Image: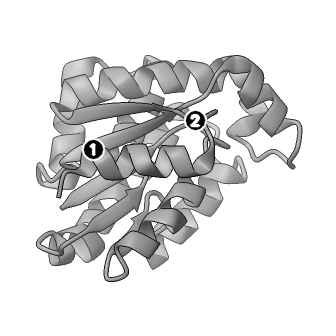
Amino acid sequence: MYIAIEGIDTAGKSTQIKALSKYFPNAIITKEPGATEIGKEIREMVLSARTKSKKTEFLLFLADRAEHIFKVIEPNINSEMLISDRSAVSGVAYALTQGDIDKEKLVSLNHFATNGVYPEKIFLLRLTKEELEHRLSQKELDEIELRGSEYLLAIQDAIVEATELLGIELIEIDATLPREEITRNILTNINL
């Protein structure tokens, strides 16, 4: 089963993936962007604000996505459990907030980059504005986080729209719940 844990920065994706790996010790754990050598370079370019054009940023993420699908997802698609920290859904969500590409092209370009391979289920860890701002205040911010809480909350809403556009099942979970309860909610909804 291929699932992705989605959410804006500080939502607890890494924490939940670590918890899930205890229940699925043979799971293939990956992330987007940055799971491949090329992906690591692309991630660094974007997070260090080396790109100035939003279209360039979008196309770099598509390149990372295509390499990730080819080198990680497709070879492991029949694994018992394949868990990704973000997926094409995040890429579509970020692009939706930019508004530079119409939705039909956005879906088409992502379908091209992924060969139509998407997670079976998306788990969105949803944060409130208050909790997001609190969590951001506790860390050094990267280029994306420096865009502010309103921007990140718009992406969170766009994640919902992205799952609809891509036709992927979405399970929303309150990211302010205790960690163990979030993990139980994910496990219950995996339905293995």
Identify which amino acid the numbered label 1 is placed on. Asn
Q: Residue at x 33, y 75 (%)?
A: 28
What is the x, y in percent for residue 190?
A: 25, 51
- Residue 78: which quarter of the image? bottom left
- Residue 21: which quarter of the image? bottom left
Q: Name the side, left or right, on which 170 lies relative to 18.
A: left
- Residue 25: which quarter of the image? bottom left
Comes first in the chain, label 1 or label 2 = 2
Q: Secondary structure at mark 2?
A: loop
Q: CA distance from mark 1 to mark 2?
A: 15 Å
Tell me if mark 2 has few (under 14), some (14-19) or many (20+) residues whose alpha carbon lies within 10 angstroms of its own: many
Q: Secondary structure at mark 1?
A: helix
Of 115 and 27, the residue lying toward us? 27
* Relative to 99, residue 132 above or below: below
Q: Residue at x 45, y 74 (%)?
A: 22
Residue with the most extreme bottom position:
26
Of 117 and 18, the residue lying toward us? 18
What is the x, y in percent for residue 66?
A: 28, 60
What is the x, y in percent for residue 30?
A: 41, 68
Identify which amino acid the numbered label 2 is placed on. Ala
Point out which mark residue 115 bears: none
- The answer to whether residue 148 shows anywhere in this view is no
Q: Residue at x 60, y 49 (%)?
A: 179
Q: Residue at x 67, y 43 (%)?
A: 10
What residue is shown with label 1? 189
Of 98 and 87, the residue lying toward us? 87
Q: Name the side, left or right, on which 128 lies relative to 96.
A: right
What residue is shown with label 2? 175
